[in-house]
Amino acid sequence: MLAASALTNADWYLMRSSGVVALVLLTASFVLGVATFRRWRPMELPRFVTASLHRSVSLLAVVFLAAHVVTAIADPYAVLGLAAAFIPFLAGRNAFWVGLGAVSLDLFIALILSSLLRARIGARAWKTIHWTAYLSWPLALAHSFGTGSDAGALWLRAVGASCVVAVGAAVVWRLAAPRFKHLEPRAVSL
Amino acid sequence: MSAYAGQSLRSRDHQGTLGLLPPRGAGAYEEFLNLYGPTPTPGERLIGVLEGSGLSGRGGAGFPTARKLRAVRDGRRPVVLANGTEGEPASHKDEVLLAHNPHLVIDGALLAADAVRARRVIIAVARATDAAAQLERALASRPDGDRVEVKTVPERFIAGEESALVHFLNGGEAKPTATPPRAFERGVGGRPTLVQNVETLATLALIARYGEEWFRASGTAAEPGNVLATVCGAVRMPGVLEVPLGILLSDLFARCGGLTEPASAYLVGGYFGRWVPPIEGLELSNESLATAGGRLGARTVIALPESSCGVLESARVIAYMARQSAEQCGPCVFGLRTLAARFATIARAEPGATEAYRALAGLHRQIARRGACAHPDGVLEFAASATTVFADEFSAHLAGHCTAHSHQHVLPVPTKQGDWR
Amino acid sequence: MSKPLHLTLDMIRCDAYGHCAELLPEIIELDQWGYPIINDPSLPEHLHADARRAITACPRLALKLEHRPAANAPARSGHAL
């Protein structure tokens, strides 16, 4: 009995922590995605490094997200069936907030798959799917705040706030991008 | 812009037949039939006749017409697209042709359609002209008129470029697209599309009536036939004329009432063409013009008066062409703007002129063949011809002064521009 | 013996990210505005792997590998008229 409850506790902690790490990684990925678009060069390194980092961090996020989903399904207290992890609002407990996570997860899977198969699906389709990142991330954030009993813990709130600041700054950075054709050549006259 | 139909030069063998511009307008269908007779129906045999005639495109690129028809005929459910958009500001030949002889153009389009077994026939014209209304009227007056659609396109220099036109008709912007595929492979609605200038189609309609021998009786051996040319600048009576290929430029100017003053250069082929020096004996043909560094293009011939400044006029054209970029490719956007800025500096004979002039060669290397279409290359060749032909004037500008008496603008450069949809 | 491969660039898609020049500096350099100039589109064998990496890395999917050189099609018709 003790072993079972210890396992359950461990599973619960793993689920929570992998979720937090996943959120941080998704935040980092978001920022790196904007950085790639803005042609950011970290410390004079080549620009493809930024893009490469974006990709690596995103794939790492997959690992932690997978852990988060698996441990959530295994957790008897979370009452999350396999289907509910992907189909929103099917969960037994906390259906709404968990559901947001499910939608975010679905979008993220589409993001990852479309990027891996980019050459096959073509640039336009890839770009359309990639823009859903702007929806996926806020859903993940809302999910993380709406679920779990330690949502009130200060450290978690600090982490969440930092992520919001980072993504907010990235969005502003994205919007500030200059359009390249903004100058009109003047007519010539004497 | 008037049409000098009555002045069209005819070779001995062409007596008794009519050309592209009849002595009086052939607007009404009955009038047209009286003048030209009924439309023949050679079907696919037309392609062989066109091959024998040696007809090449009249829109500027000069590609052999028969070869184009053959390429499209092998495709599935092809489309015929008559290009009457005439984005070149100094050219009016298509406008005049469509106004004075729309039925010949329609005939040509339908004949081409039958030759390639096309179900769909489109004539594209620029939005801001009367051409669309004139065409609709002409189509309404003939029994086969419902086979042809008229489409209007935005007023942009590049809207008449083959892939831009196709892209626009497919619902996109009037901007060039990356090729392959070319229009003859996949064009309007994804179908193999035959894109021909309206003058080419009208000429095709004449060849269908009078035959390849008739066509070859005019022009030169390598460049047969009669063509429409737009002549303006320092001539008494600017206009559009129908003349045989190979005619002396001096004869051409004489037909326009002669030059008002000696010319320092001729601009042949419009803003996508090249300046040539006013040498004796130059003829309206690629062969002859090539000896002076020029090419025929769409046969816009502008005589620049001696009193004007060739550098200024060239700078104005380049600035216009830079504004007309579709702005899709970096080297075109930035390259042409830089080129325009350098030419402007030189035109104003400013202190930085020498530096700007020296930088031109390097700029050429950074722009040439690096766009998705030929627009930047055309501008580069125009610019290069300017530096060659106006070499003395450039030297003066680099020394800080201009030798021209008049700085009044000669070349027609529009300031208003249309949008892309 | 593998078929000769040629690198083609869609200049309309290209947005001067410059990743290709970083990954394939042997044959791609950037002009003064940041756009790639492909010096030798026919790829030597030892650069095939790097070329594939460059193609995958392009954020705009502007680079392609083809088995034959870009067709030297005749000048496009209808330009300017």
Image: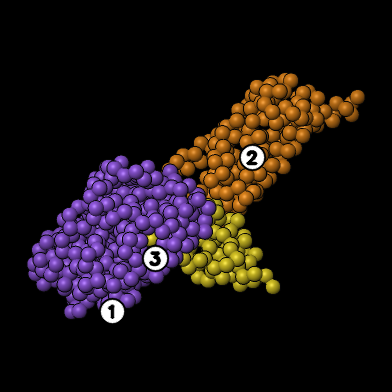
> Measuring 42% from the left and 53% from the top, which residue is drawn there?
B113
Residue C6 pos. (x, y %): 57, 67
* Labels 1, 2: front one: 1
The residue where tag 2 is placed is A110
Could you say whether the residue bearing mark 1 is in a helix, strand or loop?
loop
Badges 3 and 2: C-beta atoms under 8 Å apart? no
Look at the image and give the colour of chain C. yellow
Does label 1 lie on the same chain as label 3? yes
**Looking at the rendering, in which quadrant would you find the N terminus of chain B?**
bottom left
Q: Residues within 10 Å of mark 3 (few under 14, many from 20)?
A: many
CA–CA distance between discs 1 and 2?
A: 62 Å
Q: Earlier in the sequence, mark 3 or mark 1?
A: 3
For residue A179, say whether it is visible: no
Q: Which chain is orange?
A: A
Callout 2: SS: helix
Q: Which residue is mark 3?
A: B50
B95 left or right of B167 in image: left
- Chain at tag 2: A
The 10 Å Cα crowd at callout 1, few under 14, some 14 to 19, many 20 or more, is few
The residue drawn where x is 69% and y is 73% is C1
Q: Which residue is mark 1?
A: B291
